Image: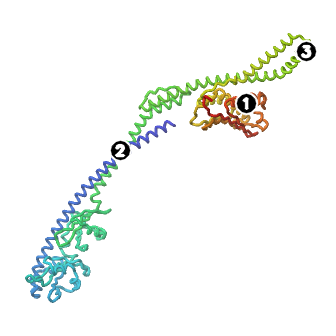
């Protein structure tokens, strides 16, 4: 199951990396292609817009120029109103489709406007008089086009020409063009396709006409903000765009002051971009499939040695060096080499642990023998003491045989010496401690072995907690181990009745001025009297004890200038704290 998870993990990781890398490349290519395509289409649209404006400008120039020539011919007859009226009828220019919708003449001398059309075809005189273009025509030699005027269901724009008598400007002759019917506006604006609209504006920004596309009136509508944006331009020709459309604005048509705005939907020039993007999406989908295939093959190639390594590790009961049939990449080789080194270290540690356990068992046997010897020595010494005193009293009696008394006393001394030897054996020669710099980390590893061996017969939870950094300590390593081992043994015996609920925990705390060892259990505990007897020889509450263990431990702690503190409650447990000061060797 774990091997399958590992293979799936490699598969997804490799596939994801490949797909992301390829997608980044595709995205970069697509972005570049988009920019190139858009640039080309914009250039093409600009050229087509310029062409549309040029064609429209030429058509407007021809149409307006033709009408200007005709109206200039008519204004020659303004000196005789009858002749002028007859000339208008003969010219057939009073036609809303091909000519003008209405004519008028303004006589500057009389300040009077004379109309040559019915009232339904003309605007009010006041509107003419207030028109800026009309006022310009009074003082200019060129013709001028008025703003847009509504008239019933139509709009009119007037062409004003100045009338002169010699060098004197005597009036203005004008004709009104129908924006809805005049061929000037219906046929002059040219667009290169049905999607593109051309708009004709006067200088006031009022629309005069649109190209004759096959579109609805709603589609012909133009936002006022777009018109304002175009008229703010200071360039002769400018391209700008909105979210939906692209615009080309031409300000100089060389026909009065009219302007043309060409609108092209963005979809027209983005369609090739959309096509290109669809192609890249197809490529991305194929890339995903290819990434899945390549990812699967690469994951198998990479995980095969790892799977073989895992299977061999799972089958082995003990750490053993492993050789793979397919070593794979350098990373896998490094992993196998590291595992083999680890397996060798574990094997060496196992052998060392067995050796340590044998030593511990041997020491425990000696300790048991020493405990037995101490008990025997104590029991023998008690009756021998009064015997010796009696013999000493007898020796003072001069009537007894002095040789016999001397022999008896010497034999008692020999027996006492033998008993002392047995006590020294039980004390494990603690009188002479070998001091030196102790590697606390290694010592705690030894203590771990001691704890494991001692806790083997018990079901209690036994643990040792040490800090990450453990400096050296000037002390006797054997003495420290003997004290800690004795405390651990007492704790294990105290929690024996607890079974699996018992705990025996050892904590090491390192402070700047001292080391503190804490041995904690939740055993039977001790009362105040028992605590007061700690450290006294032959004082014990154990059935088979002799009271020498804590006595010897107290002596060892004392020789290290340390102290031993015990906190215990009956039924709760016991906590033993050992304080060892940090000091230099010369101390």
**Rendered location of residue 429, percent (x, y):** 70, 22
Q: Do the residues labelled 2 and 3 touch (CB within 8 Å)?
A: no
Q: Which mark is residue 550?
A: 1
Residue at the spot 17% in from the left edge and 66% down from the top edge: 55
Q: In this view, does 204 lie above or below 13?
A: below
Residue 266 shows in this picture: yes
Corner quadrant of residue 221: bottom left
Pointer 2 local density, CA inside 10 Å: few below 14, some 14–19, many at least 20: some
**Rendered location of residue 425, percent (x, y):** 72, 21
Residue at the spot 58% in from the left edge and 33% down from the top edge: 471
Say left or right for 481 vs 83.
right
Q: What element carries label 1?
A: helix
Query: Can you tell which of label 2 and label 3 is closer to the viewer?
Result: 3
Say left or right for 341 vs 20.
right
Name the residue carrying label 2.
22
Sequence-first tag of 1 and 3 = 3
Q: Distance between the residues labelled 1 and 2?
A: 74 Å
Image quadrant holding the C terminus, namely top right
Pointer 1 local density, CA inside 10 Å: few below 14, some 14–19, many at least 20: many
Query: Can you tell which of label 1 and label 2 is closer to the viewer?
Result: 1
In-front residue for pair 557/292 = 557
Q: In this view, does 64 lie above or below 388?
A: below
């Amino acid at each position: 199951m774990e091997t399958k998870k590992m293979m799936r993990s490699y598969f997804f990781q490799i596939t994801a990396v490949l797909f992301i890398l390829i997608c980044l490349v595709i995205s970069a290519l697509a972005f570049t292609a988009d920019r190139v395509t858009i640039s080309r289409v914009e250039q093409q649209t600009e050229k087509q817009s310029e062409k549309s404006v040029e064609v429209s400008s030429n058509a407007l120039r021809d149409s307006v120029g033709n009408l200007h020539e005709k109206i200039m011919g008519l204004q020659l007859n303004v000196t005789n109103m009858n002749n002028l009226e007859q000339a208008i009828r003969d010219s057939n220019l009073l036609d809303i489709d091909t000519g003008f919708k209405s004519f008028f003449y303004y006589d500057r001398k009389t300040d009077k406007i004379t109309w040559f059309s019915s009232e339904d075809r003309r605007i009010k005189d006041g509107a003419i008089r207030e028109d800026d273009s009309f006022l310009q025509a009074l003082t200019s030699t060129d013709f001028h086009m008025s703003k847009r005027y509504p008239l019933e269901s139509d709009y009119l724009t007037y062409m004003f020409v100045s009338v002169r008598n010699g060098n004197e400007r005597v009036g203005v002759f004008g004709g009104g063009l129908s924006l809805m019917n005049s061929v000037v506006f219906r046929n002059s604006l040219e667009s290169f396709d049905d999607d593109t609209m051309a708009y004709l504006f006067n200088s006031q920004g009022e629309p005069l006409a649109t190209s004759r596309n096959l579109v609805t009136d709603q589609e012909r509508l133009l936002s006022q903000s777009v018109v304002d944006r175009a008229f703010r331009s200071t360039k002769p020709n400018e391209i700008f765009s909105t979210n939906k459309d692209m615009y080309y604005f031409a300000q100089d048509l060389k026909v009065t002051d009219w302007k043309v705005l060409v609108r092209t939907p963005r979809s027209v020039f983005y369609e090739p971009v959309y096509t290109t993007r669809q192609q890249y999406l197809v490529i991305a989908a194929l890339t995903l499939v290819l990434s899945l295939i390549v990812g699967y093959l690469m994951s198998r190639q990479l995980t095969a040695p790892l799977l073989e390594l895992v299977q061999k590790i799972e089958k082995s009961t003990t750490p053993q060096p492993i050789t793979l049939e397919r070593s794979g990449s350098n990373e896998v080789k490094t992993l196998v080499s590291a595992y083999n080194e680890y397996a060798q270290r574990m094997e060496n540690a196992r052998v060392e642990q067995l050796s340590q356990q044998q030593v511990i068992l041997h020491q425990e046997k000696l300790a048991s023998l020493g405990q037995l010897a101490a008990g025997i020595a104590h029991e023998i010494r008690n009756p021998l003491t009064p015997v010796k005193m009696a013999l000493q009293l007898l020796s003072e009696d001069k009537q007894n045989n002095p040789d016999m008394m001397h022999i008896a006393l010497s034999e008692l001394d020999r027996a006492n010496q033998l008993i002392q030897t047995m006590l020294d054996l039980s004390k494990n020669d603690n009188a002479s401690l070998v001091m030196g710099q102790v590697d606390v980390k290694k010592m705690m590893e030894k203590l771990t072995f001691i704890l494991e061996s001692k806790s083997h017969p018990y079901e209690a939870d036994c643990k040792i907690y040490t800090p990450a950094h453990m400096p050296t300590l000037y002390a006797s390593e054997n003495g420290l181990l003997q004290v800690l081992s004795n405390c651990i043994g007492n704790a294990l015996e105290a929690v024996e009745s607890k079974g699996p609920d018992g705990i025996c925990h050892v904590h090491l705390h390192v402070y700047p001025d001292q080391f503190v060892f804490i041995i904690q259990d939740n055993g039977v505990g001790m009362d105040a009297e028992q605590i007061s007897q700690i450290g006294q020889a032959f004082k014990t509450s154990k059935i088979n004890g002799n009271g020498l263990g804590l006595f010897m431990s107290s002596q060892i702690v004392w020789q290290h200038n340390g102290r031993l503190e015990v906190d215990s409650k009956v039924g709760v447990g016991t906590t033993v704290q050992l304080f060892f000061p940090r000091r230099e060797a010369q101390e």
